[in-house]
């Protein structure tokens, strides 16, 4: 009997739980629910958190949606700017279901993926149009004052939002921002080439400016050295001249006997002009070789 | 009654075969993966149903043969007939025995091979399959599979009931397969319904689950084949066909769990295990045990443990409980499904990276160079104030000038954050993690698009990190993310790998320029120093010369004055003496030739030129051509 009571209690609890699951549904703080009775949506969606009664399937069905801001990123797609530059962009979008009752029938039972696909197609269209009316320097510019990043994002958002409101999709676009901007591969390669060429200019500047500076320093040094040497040579000439002048002061002494002076000068000159490798040819009359003339000569037969 | 068993078997066979063909066609029409797997089960069911029906026919023939022999024995009363050999007297019995002895194990092996091969091939095919169920074909396929399920269920349920009767055991294998086929068709229909409800992977997962089931069936039949070798043979005990899968029977009739288990144990051990007290106790109290276990499970949902570094949001019927942010520790709550708890890592510092995706290999490297990719890097557009002006006349020939006036840069920016408002984090955005990354990436893209490449790589770098941190925090607050940005690091910023080498070359060229200038300065110093020295030497030589000239002149003058008296005293002798003294001194080392003119006939010729080297004289000079 005791065991039967326990079984009954547990069974009753289980039945209550199953009944709750069948007849009650919960709406979370982050959710909004649409209830359909035989396929027809009820008057007001359930947008406040709590537990609500419903008839079990197939009489009533509950469709729950996340009413928080949902975000997704569109495809990294290529567009042409107003100044004919190809630009790749990708934007992220934050959107939320603002009117679940309108949203529910438009996307096959409230399919969020279907809604995102629709939003993405709208977004791509608006993005192409807005990018096409702006120049590249509005997206990338070393002067931040000329950037129109925020304005472009707001323009795309306004364009998509107006379409959403016009057709009453039950969706609200909360925010939009560029996540990626880039260039197609071929243009990227061209940018790399340009960056390389800029570096090449700087390399040439450094290399040839260095060579030129070195050349200048060397030539200045050569000139300076030449000046110093030339001045020294000039000084030397002058000094030698002074010596000559001093030496010339004793010449009157030699004038006392010019014959002897001339003779001495000649033998000095003779002495200085003969060196070790000199070959001299004398005849027998040259003193002191004239002594040979007195020596008897032997007959040729001997 | 016996005739009805054969008929039932035939009806099952025909129904299974027809539905197998129909399911195969519907699968091809809808491109359902689960339908493909279901078709294999139905095909196996047709085989098993056919074999069991054939075996029933053999047993029926044996029964009729015995009846005929009994009749003959009663009418003739002769024993001659019974003296003949068994094979000649009981051909139908002999045929049935041979069938059970050889064909049934062989069919078991075949079934094992088919199930193993089917599971393996089907798994590979499903993994590679790229097609999906066409939306417009999902509903007809779903309906048809539901109808197949219903038909098979009716046939199977009826046959399973009949199979419990005596001598109808051979109806059971086919009936079980038919009933299992019904459930599999139902599950397949659910899978297609899932696809219809935008859960595109449901069909795929159902197909995978059926593959696993097929593999389990193969394993079961293999075990049965092995156990069959060691099973004790009890005389008079009717053996269970190997192809009669217990797993299929259990899945087809889950309520018969205990019956199946008891039969299996009894069959395997050769005595009635199912009649032991433990087995009976377990069988009697199982519902209570299951209920109690469920109750314990439910009670366990009344306690929640929050780990260190976490916070949790408590919801009661979907509504956050006031003050319901749970901190680390144990907490009581109402059981599921009234209260639910959602955990968040609030204390933990979370990190994501902008601009690069780290990879394990490069993380282990100790040196990070611009010119070597150290992660999966992303190029960002950056402004460019051109460092030099390129002349316009080259514009037509130089392709590089056609590039837009932007540059590319690679950055590695780790962002660290902490959840500081768990309610905002949980309830304002569906995917706050992803949104925060989007906001951070946008801030980086925006910032880099408005700065100069060289500036951001050098002096603006420090300012960049602060600007980015502030911007990300502002954006996160605007989106009510409930996070605090702790750190934004510009740990790496450099030109893309493809052009990084050229940037390094510029630095090298700058150093070369300094080196060339330094070398020139050194040369200049050397040149000037040597010139100074040369000038000094030249001047000094001049001074020495001057001094020499002066003193020599004085000396000569003094000498001359002293020579005059001697000269005047003996002019010729003095002259001669001076001449010979000088001659002897001057010609002491000179080569001297003296010509004596006593022999006027002889002419002596002296070659007075310096001797030239012998080897040069031996040179063979080619003869010049005469004109």
Image (tube, rainbow, N blue to C red):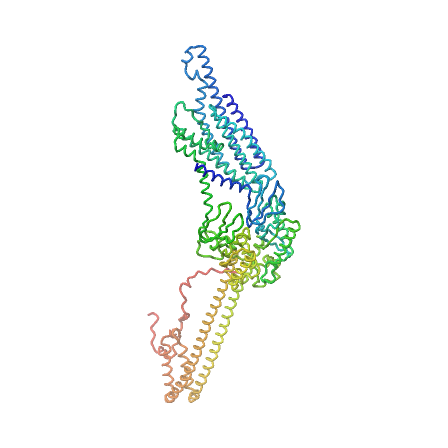
Residue B607's quadrant in the figure? bottom left
Task: From the viewer's perspective, tell me whether residue A302 is left or right of residue B32.
Answer: left
- Residue B546 lies, in percent from the top left, at 43, 82
- Residue A250 lies, in percent from the top left, at 43, 87
- Residue B424 lies, in percent from the top left, at 53, 54
Up the image or down, B271 lies above or below A72; here it is above
Query: Please, which residue is most extreme toward the front here?
Result: A1
Up the image or down, B287 lies above or below A281; here it is above
Residue visible at 37% across and 80% down in the picture: B582
Residue visible at 40% across and 33% down in the picture: B279
Up the image or down, A185 lies above or below A275; here it is above
User: Which residue is at the front of the view, A228 or B105?
Assistant: B105
User: Which residue is at the front of the view, B289 or B249?
Assistant: B289
Query: Please, which residue is most extreme toward the right here?
Result: A166
Whether residue A194 is visible here, answered yes or no, is no
Whether residue B340 is visible here, answered yes or no, is yes
- Residue A126 lies, in percent from the top left, at 64, 52
Residue visible at 49% across and 39% down in the picture: A12
Count of numbered tags:
0
User: Which residue is at the front of the view, A187 or B483?
Assistant: B483
Up the image or down, B31 lies above or below B232; here it is below
Residue B548's quadrant in the figure? bottom left
């Amino acid at each position: 009997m005791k065991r039967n009571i326990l079984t009954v209690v547990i069974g009753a609890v289980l039945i209550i739980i199953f009944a709750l699951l069948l007849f009650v549904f919960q709406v979370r703080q982050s959710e909004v629910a649409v209830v359909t009775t035989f396929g027809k949506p009820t008057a007001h969606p359930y947008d406040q958190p709590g537990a609500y009664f419903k008839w079990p399937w197939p009489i009533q069905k509950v469709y729950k949606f996340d009413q928080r801001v949902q975000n997704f990123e569109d495809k990294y797609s290529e567009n042409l700017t107003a100044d004919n530059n190809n630009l790749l962009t990708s934007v992220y979008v934050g959107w939320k279901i603002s009117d679940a009752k309108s949203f529910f029938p438009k996307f096959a039972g409230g399919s969020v993926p279907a809604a995102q696909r629709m939003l993405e197609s709208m977004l791509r269209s608006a993005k192409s149009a807005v990018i096409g009316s702006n120049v590249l320097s509005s997206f990338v510019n070393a002067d931040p004052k000329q950037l129109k990043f925020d304005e472009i994002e707001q323009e795309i958002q306004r364009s998509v939002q107006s379409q959403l409101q016009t057709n009453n999709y039950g969706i609200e676009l909360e925010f939009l921002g560029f996540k990626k901007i880039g260039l197609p591969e071929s243009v990227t390669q061209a940018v790399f080439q340009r960056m390389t060429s800029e570096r090449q200019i700087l390399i040439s500047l450094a290399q040839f400016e260095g060579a030129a500076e070195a050349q200048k320093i060397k030539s200045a040094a050569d000139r300076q050295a030449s000046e110093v040497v030339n001045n020294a040579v000039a000084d030397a000439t002058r000094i030698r001249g002074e010596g000559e002048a001093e030496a010339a002061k004793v010449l009157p002494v030699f004038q006392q006997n010019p014959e002897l002076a001339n003779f001495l000068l000649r033998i000095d000159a003779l002495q200085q002009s003969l060196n070790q490798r000199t070959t001299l040819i004398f005849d027998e009359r040259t003193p002191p070789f004239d002594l040979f003339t007195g020596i008897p000569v032997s007959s040729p037969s001997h | 009654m016996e005739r009805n068993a054969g008929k039932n078997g035939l009806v099952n066979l025909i129904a299974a075969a027809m539905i197998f063909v129909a399911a195969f066609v519907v699968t091809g029409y809808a491109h359902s993966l689960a339908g493909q797997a279901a078709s294999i089960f139905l095909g196996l069911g047709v085989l098993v149903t056919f074999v069991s029906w054939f075996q029933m026919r053999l047993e029926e023939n044996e029964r009729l043969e015995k009846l005929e022999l009994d009749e003959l024995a009663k009418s003739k009363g002769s024993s001659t007939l019974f003296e003949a050999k068994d094979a000649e007297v009981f051909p139908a019995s002999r045929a049935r025995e041979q069938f059970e002895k050889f064909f049934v194990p062989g069919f078991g092996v075949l079934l094992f091979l088919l199930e193993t091969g089917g599971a393996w091939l089907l798994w590979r095919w499903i993994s590679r399959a790229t097609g999906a169920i066409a939306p417009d074909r999902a509903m007809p396929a779903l309906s048809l599979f539901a109808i197949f399920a219903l038909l098979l269920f009716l046939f199977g349920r009826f046959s399973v009931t009949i199979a419990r009767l005596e001598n109808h055991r051979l109806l059971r294998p086919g009936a079980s397969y038919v009933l299992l086929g019904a459930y599999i068709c139902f599950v397949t229909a659910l899978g297609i319904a899932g696809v219809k409800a935008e859960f595109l992977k449901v069909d795929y997962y159902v197909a995978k689950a059926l593959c696993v089931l097929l593999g389990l069936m193969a394993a079961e039949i293999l075990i049965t084949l092995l156990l069959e070798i060691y099973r004790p043979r009890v005389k008079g005990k009717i053996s269970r066909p190997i192809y009669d899968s217990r797993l299929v029977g259990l899945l087809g009739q889950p309520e018969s769990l205990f019956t199946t288990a008891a039969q299996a144990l009894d069959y395997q051990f050769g005595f009635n295990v199912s009649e032991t007290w433990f087995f009976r106790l377990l069988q009697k109290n199982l519902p209570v045990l299951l209920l109690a276990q469920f109750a314990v499970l439910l009670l366990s949902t009344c306690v929640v443990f929050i780990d260190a570094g976490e916070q949790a949001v408590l919801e009661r019927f979907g509504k956050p409980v006031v003050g319901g942010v749970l901190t680390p520790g144990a907490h009581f709550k109402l059981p599921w499904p009234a209260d639910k708890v959602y955990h968040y890592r609030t204390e933990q510092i979370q990190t994501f990276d902008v601009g690069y995706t780290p990879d394990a290999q490069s993380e282990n490297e100790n040196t990070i160079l611009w010119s070597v990719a150290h992660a999966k890097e992303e190029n960002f557009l950056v402004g460019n104030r051109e460092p030099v002006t390129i002349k316009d006349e080259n514009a037509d020939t130089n392709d590089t000038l056609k590039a837009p006036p932007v540059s590319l840069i690679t950055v590695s920016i780790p962002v660290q954050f902490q959840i500081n408002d768990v309610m905002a984090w949980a309830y304002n955005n569906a995917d706050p993690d992803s949104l925060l990354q989007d906001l951070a990436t946008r801030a980086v893209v925006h910032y880099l698009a408005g700065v100069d490449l060289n500036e951001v790589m050098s002096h603006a770098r420090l300012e960049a990190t602060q600007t980015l941190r502030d911007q990300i925090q502002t954006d996160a607050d605007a989106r009510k993310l409930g996070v605090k940005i702790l750190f934004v690091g510009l740990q790496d910023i450099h030109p893309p790998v493809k052009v990084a080498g050229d940037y390094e070359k510029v630095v090298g060229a700058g150093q070369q320029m300094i080196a060339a200038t330094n070398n020139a300065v050194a040369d200049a110093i050397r040149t000037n120093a040597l010139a100074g020295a040369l000038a000094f030497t030249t001047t000094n030589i001049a001074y020495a010369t001057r001094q020499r000239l002066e003193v020599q002149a004085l000396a000569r003058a003094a000498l001359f004055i002293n020579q005059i008296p001697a000269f005047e005293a003996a002019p010729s002798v003095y002259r001669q003496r001076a001449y010979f003294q000088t001659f002897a001194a001057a010609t002491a080392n000179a080569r001297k030739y003296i010509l004596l003119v006593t022999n006027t006939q002889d002419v002596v010729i002296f070659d007075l030129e310096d001797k030239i080297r012998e080897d040069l004289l031996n040179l063979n000079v080619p003869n010049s051509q005469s004109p």
